[in-house]
Structures are given as C-alpha cells and as structure tokens.
Image: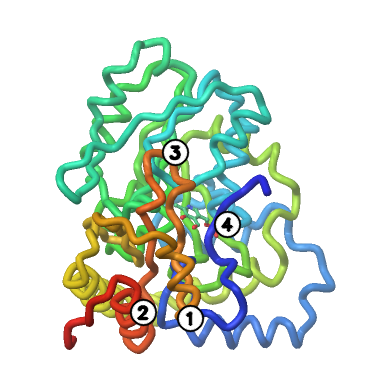
Amino acid sequence: MLRVHGGRPPPGVLDFSSPLNPLGPPRILVETIERLVRERVYGVYPDYDYGGLREAIAEHYGVAAESVVPLNGAAEGLSLLVLALRPRRLVTVEPTFGDHALASRALGIPWLAVPYALDGLEYRLDPEALCRLPEESRRGSLVVLSNPNNPTGSLASRSSIEELAACLEEGSVLVVDEAFSDFAGDSESLLGIDSGGIVVLRSFTKMMAVPGLRAGFMYTPDARVRALVDSVRQPWNVNALASMALEEVLRERSLLRDFVNKTVEYVSAERELLASGLRALGIEVYGSRAPFLLVRQPEPHPGFNEKLVGRGIYVRDASSFSHLTPHHSRVSVRSRADNLRLLEAVGDVVGRSPQEP
Ligand SMILES: Cc1ncc(COP(=O)(O)O)c(C=O)c1O
C-alpha cells in the first residue's frame, strides 16, 4: 500500500480516525444534493470553467472570483501544485499531512523536512527554522504547511506565517493548507492575502462532513500560479453534483454562518472533555485548535490501538507521520456519547477508570 490515511475502520467500529464535523453535514446541503440527484445532474458535464462556483466561493469568502480555482478537495491542490510548478525542492514543516514523500520520489524532486518547534505539549511554527536554511534551499522551492496543522492540531499565527514567507527567495511558493481553518474561527486565515507567491488551500470536506463529495478550492492572488494549476487540472475536476450543490448552498450565508458557529462551540467543548478525560487517564494530550487531538502514551501500552479496536474504537495510529512514534495516536472529536465511549475504552486498556464528566 502506497498511502496511509485515516477513515478505514474495521466494520462496526466507531471511527475516531477521520476528523469531520461531529454534527454531520448542514441539512440544506443534504437536501440540495438529494434534489440534484433527483434532477439527474450527473447526466451533464460540469462547466469546466466553474464560473458560477467560483463566483459563489468568492462571494462567500469575500475574495475576488478570478483568484479562486475549484478543486477536487484540498488534497488535489497539493498534488497539482507540485505538478504545475515543478519546484526545485519541496519543503514541508513536519509532522504534517500529505503524500509529500510519495510525490517527491515519483517526480524526482528533493524533499526537505523542517520541524515544528515543541514547547512542552505545544507544537509551534518556528519561522526561524526555515529562515536559517541556506539561501539555495529557499529559492525555487514549494513550501507547504497546514494550519491548523494535521496531526498536531496546532494553529500558527498569521504573523508567524508571514514572517516565514518573508524568508523565501525568488521563485518559491508558500502553500498554506487551511483544510481545518473554519474550526479555529478563521482568525489566522490567509484567505484574501494580496502577496504573490502565496497559495491558500481550503476544503469543504471537514466542516461540512462530506468526505465523499470531494470539493475544495485554491485561493491565490498570483496569476502565474493560478494559470499553471488551471492548465494541469483535468477539465472537469469537480463533479457536477458537488459543484452545483456548493454553488447553491454557499449563497445561504447566514444559515452557514450559524452552522459554523454552532459547530465551533460544540467541537471546543467536546475537545476539552476528551482532553481532560484522557489526561486523567495518564495520556499526554497536545494543544489543539482542530477537531482532533494528538495524544501520546508516556508509558507505552503495547498494542494500544489494536486493543481499542477490540473495544469498538478505531483511532489513527500516528506513527506514519514523520517525527512521530508508535506511541502517538490521533483522536477525532465526535459526539458526547461517542467521546464518553472512547474514554471508557481507553480507561479499560490502560487499567484506570475515567472521571465523571
Ligand atoms: C491538512 C489536510 N489537508 C487536506 C486534507 C484533505 O482534504 P480534502 O478532503 O478536501 O481533499 C486533509 C485530510 O485529512 C488534511 O488533514
């Protein structure tokens, strides 16, 4: 198997491996999709320019329509950017999400990993780590980071990302993958930024809980990058159902704003319940602004993840992320009832009882 991602739980087991909005998709999106299926929109090709979808995204997020390229999920942006820009080097801030090692090996592009700084149990973006690289490594590179970061959950400030961007030399492009940004209230988002050489990727997968729909977009004020990505994407990269449904639903601004606010409140409360419950069971929990927690067993419990599966709980073994170990796991935030089941199962595996919530 080439790739390792979450979201493939054994049958009948609660999936804590794939972080999605625990409240499920907004009702308006479900109703719109169901209506469009009845109208058989899958019988037509989507508009390969995605004029209507670009407009709807632009209006929703307050950016210019020409700065938007619709994508088949944010993940498509990561692959397309490597193909389109053919950078001299791929630089990532680790540990992070993405098939960078695969892409760099397949295309023969050298890959350089720069670590996040770790202060206790807080991962922190350290712009200096990138600024200290030799000038040669900062020229013609594609630099990728995700914010909030998967799998750490850490949120870097917009000012620290801008500081990092300022260290890049000619021909480099910085990609900020903001797939989880709505969960952190968008306070540090770079959407709308007006500097060349910066690309923001966004996803509809996580907040709208529709991983099977496959939709996201790229924002960049850089016309050269947009044109290159647009010329290597396949013409109908976003399917007709996803593009028509989102074009309609994104216009429901106040409904969606209420949905996002309710989600952010729910996820923060449940994340706190999970974090304090896991700490009480002797598990280390890293600071997170995302709908998941990176955790570590300070005293290793052999077969921790497998024993949880035996108790109906599937978490993401985080050892496939660079810089992490077999004692790290990533746990998604789910509903209150599910989170309590997870705490009970972990308590069972480590031989302690969970606290009363
Ligand atoms: C940081 C990050 N970016 C992108 C993706 C993929 O998002 P999408 O479903 O929009 O392709 C993920 C999926 O887990 C992710 O964690």
Which mark, by number, is residue 312?
Answer: 1
At label 3, which amino acid type do we have? Val
Whether the residue carrying mark 4 lies under 8 Å from ligand 1 is answered with yes
Horizontal and vertical percent position of residue 297 = 29, 58
Residue 338 numbered mark, or none? none
Disc 4 residue type (three-letter): Gly
Of pointers 1 and 4, the one earlier in the residue sequence? 4
**Mark 3: which secondary structure?**
strand
- The residue indicated by pointer 2 is 345
Closest to the observer, 112 or 202: 112
- For marks 3 and 1, give the CA distance: 37 Å
Give the numbered dot on residue 73: 4
Q: Are marks 3 and 1 in contact (CB under 8 Å)?
A: no
Q: Which residue is mark 3?
A: 175
Left or right: 288 in relation to 259? left
C-alpha separation, residue under disc 1 versus residue under disc 2: 8 Å
Real-space Cα separation, disc 1 to disc 4, in angstroms:
29 Å
- Specify the quadrant of the image occupied by residue 113: top left
Q: Please report the residue visible at 55 percent of the width from the left and 23 percent of the height from the top.
A: 87
> Does 5 sit above or below residue 44?
above
- Does the closest atom of ligand 1 sit within 8 Å of the Cβ of label 3? no
